[in-house]
Amino acid sequence: MPGLLGKKIGMISVFSAEGKNIPCTVIEAGPCAVTQVKTIEKDGYEAVQVGFQDQKESRVSQPLLGHFKKAGVAPKKHLAEFKDFDTALNVGDVVTVDLFADAAYVTVIGTSKGRGFQGVVKRHGFGGVGQATHGQHNRARKPGSIGACSYPAKVFKGLRMGGQMGNARVTTHNLQVLKVIPEHNLLVIKGSVPGYNGSIVIVEK
């Protein structure tokens, strides 16, 4: 799918024509510079590599620095590949938020906020043990039994338990595009997207 790299600015709310208060997320989508055009003959597949946000040359590795100089663009912090653009793109072209001018819905991919080590109640929505007597003591938020005693005498893989929560790649589909502001490279979409303010996201048509 064609798309752009962007940065999550934050959330706001707007009023619809019916007077409803709609929660929205503002994303700075682009501008992204085309750093490489991959072809079937040379790379085995067709794709367009784009870069987002300028970076100092001193903070870029030598192989990447040569890659950017060959493309004739300034070094970029973030790179991503997209397929099936409507128009043919060449190395050095700039793709802006105008890409979504005719889009009704988009898909946003980001990294969720890290929550650290969490228990089963917060991580998986366990209700906890109902009774607080008969030796229950203070274990109301514990997971309880995790396996049989005699057979199969093991804990099955994938059992929901406490552990690391968040800081994972999350994809949110079918988010409605409410407004495109090309003069500021802003995209206003309905609902929330994964990640904290300032995090890098991928927006696809």
Image (cartoon, rainbow, N blue to C red):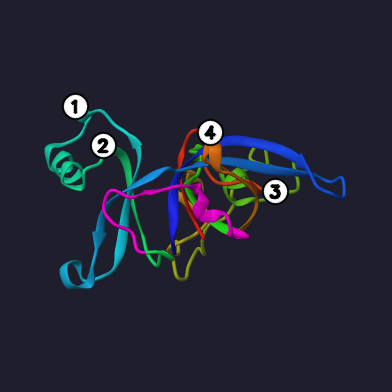
Crowding near the residue tagged with mark 1, few <14, some 14–19, many ≥20 C-alpha atoms within 10 Å: few
What residue sits right under mark 4 in the picture? 197
Q: Disc 1 marks which amino acid? A: Ser
Give the crowd class for mark 4: few <14, some 14-19, many >=20 residues within 10 Å: some
* CA separation in Å, label 4 and label 1: 26 Å
- Measured in 3D between alpha carbons, the distance from the residue under mark 2 to the one under mark 4, in whole angstroms, is 25 Å
Q: What secondary structure is found at the residue carrying circle 1?
A: helix
- Which contiguous range is marked in magenta? 88-105
Pointer 2: what residue?
Answer: 74
Write down the residue under mark 3: 129
Q: Nearer the viewer, mark 1 or mark 2?
A: 2
Quarter holding the N terminus is: bottom left
Amino acid marked by disc 3: Val
Sequence order check, earlier mark of 4 and 1 = 1
Query: Residue drawn 49% across and 33% down?
Result: 198
x%, y% of residue 25? 62, 42
In the displayed structure, would residue 44 be above or below residue 103?
below
The label nearer to you, 4 versus 1, is 1
Q: Could you tell me if the residues under marks 4 and 1 are in contact, i.e. CB atoms within 8 Å? A: no
Quarter of the image holding residue 54?
top left
Residue depicted at 19% across the width and 27% down the height: 58
* Circle number at residue 58: 1
Q: Which badge, 3 or 4, is on the more N-terminal residue?
A: 3
